[in-house]
Image (tube, rainbow, N blue to C red):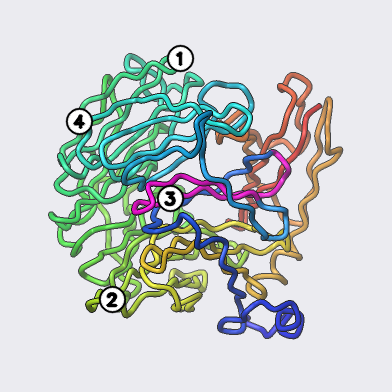
Amino acid sequence: MIKKLLFGLLMFSGLSVFAQNFSKIIVSNNQTAGIYGLLQKDLDNDGDLDLMSASQTDNTLAYYINDGTGNFTQHILSDANGYINLPGAISIDGADFDNDGDIDFAACGTSDLIWYENQGGTFTPHVIESGLNNPLQVRLYDLGTLTDPGTPDGDIDVGVLISGENYATVYMNDNNNFSRMNLISINNPKYLHGGDFDSNGTDDLVITSYTDNTIKWYKLGSWGFTTGGTIVSNFGGAFGVEGGDLDLDNDDDIVATAFTGNEIAWFENTDGTGTNFTKHSIDTNLTGASYVHWVDFDGDGDKDFIASAYGTDNGSTTTGHEVVYYENDGNMNFTKIVVDNTEAGPANFVVADFNGDGTLDIAYAASKSNKLVLMLNNTLGIETYRKNTLKLYPNPATDWIHITSTQAVQKIKILDLTGRKVLETKSLQIDVSKFNKGYYLMQVFFVSGQEKVQKFLVR
């Protein structure tokens, strides 16, 4: 499947070719010292995906505007007085907090959890809480209200891990007034993600504990979260985690990494209730296994895995660092493909089509090399993606939008640009006459298991 496509073109363009499949671009090495946090969003509503980053050593939040071909222009987050300084900036997420049609930011640093109001390219900080002890990760949801959790209310809620005090919590948003939910006690938490592990239709949380080597999930109830179950209790240095239906059996499993165990594994939800999980090890030689993400990377209808390996520090050098792709053969057997092993301390990463060629690329934060790196995918999955033709028309639309596809469609979700679900349907003709004007994302799920996302405009 791996072919030497576009080799001559890439050499002529001056891009460095890695492993005959990916070309490497340094997006930025400016204000990226200790870069860990990374996210992609369409920040300027032009139909392509931009990037956001948090750099711990530089105390910097930044965003990078994509010209549509994978070339990015860096902008440091600033207010009316100049650059915004967030000490220890480590995590960033984006959503429309004030419902004005643009993307705002939430971020955490050494002691602060803040959302930044986007006012035409300058940002006003609004403190959610200060005096925290080393918040590590921020994630944005719409979980509803304290009294009615599980029913989205249109406000952006903020989940956060506090590593210095060993807990996770969610700040519930009521018109940008925030109330903290109950605390979930976690010994040295490392990563927080969502899923529906008991198959009841409401969001659950899954959190890793580095010190306890455990991964547990938590279910949402009145006024907060309660423990749902333990996924694994002996996963050395449990670090990264994501939930999702990995084996396509209609319940949510997880994929996770073990930092000290140098392992990536997926855990099968065997009864759909979150009571029993079966571990399936994928690789036990991933040095300093860190972040992980599942996606149909090659477009063949099954879920593949992308992971970063931080490596081992040897004084001033780091060895064993790499970003890798595990290709699924359709039966949950995986082949490891190295995407890049040239930058030290690869941390968080995002997967998307950044240059508009129909295949998925990988942008990652090289925390020790102090660089934001883009690996353009030049070969994987091109034939498969082209065989599955998805068309939306008319686009822009005013009344109805129609969908045609060469593959059978299972369901369709319409999301606004903040990720909020506007509609879910099985119909290939959708009435958009009552939608607010603006851009939307159409997420199409196929019977084969493949997914595609296309953007459309209502005017």
Give the crowd class for mark 2: few <14, some 14-19, many >=20 residues within 10 Å: some
Q: Amino acid at mark 1?
A: Asn
Mark 2 or mark 4, which has the lower sequence index? Answer: 4
Give the crowd class for mark 4: few <14, some 14-19, many >=20 residues within 10 Å: some
* Residue 191: percent from left, percent from top: 30, 49
Q: Is residue 318 visible?
A: yes
Helix or strand or loop: what does disc 4 sit on?
loop
For the residues bearing labels 3 and 4, Cβ distance under 8 angstroms: no
Mark 4 or mark 1, which has the lower sequence index? Answer: 1
Q: Whole-Å distance between the Cαs marked 1 and 2?
A: 46 Å
User: Closer to us: mark 1 or mark 2?
Assistant: 1
* Residue 142: percent from left, percent from top: 45, 28
Mark 1 or mark 2, which has the lower sequence index? Answer: 1
User: Closer to us: mark 3 or mark 4?
Assistant: 4
- The residue at which mark 3 appears reads as 244
User: Closer to us: mark 3 or mark 1?
Assistant: 1
User: Closer to us: mark 2 or mark 4?
Assistant: 4
Q: Nearer the viewer, residue 142 or 222?
A: 142
- The residue at which mark 1 appears reads as 175
Most extreme residue toward the right is 394
Q: Amino acid at mark 2?
A: Thr
Helix or strand or loop: what does disc 3 sit on?
strand
Q: Amino acid at mark 4?
A: Leu
**Up-down: is 14 above or below 238?**
below
Quadrant for residue 200, please give it. Answer: top left
- The residue at which mark 2 appears reads as 284
- The residue at which mark 4 appears reads as 183
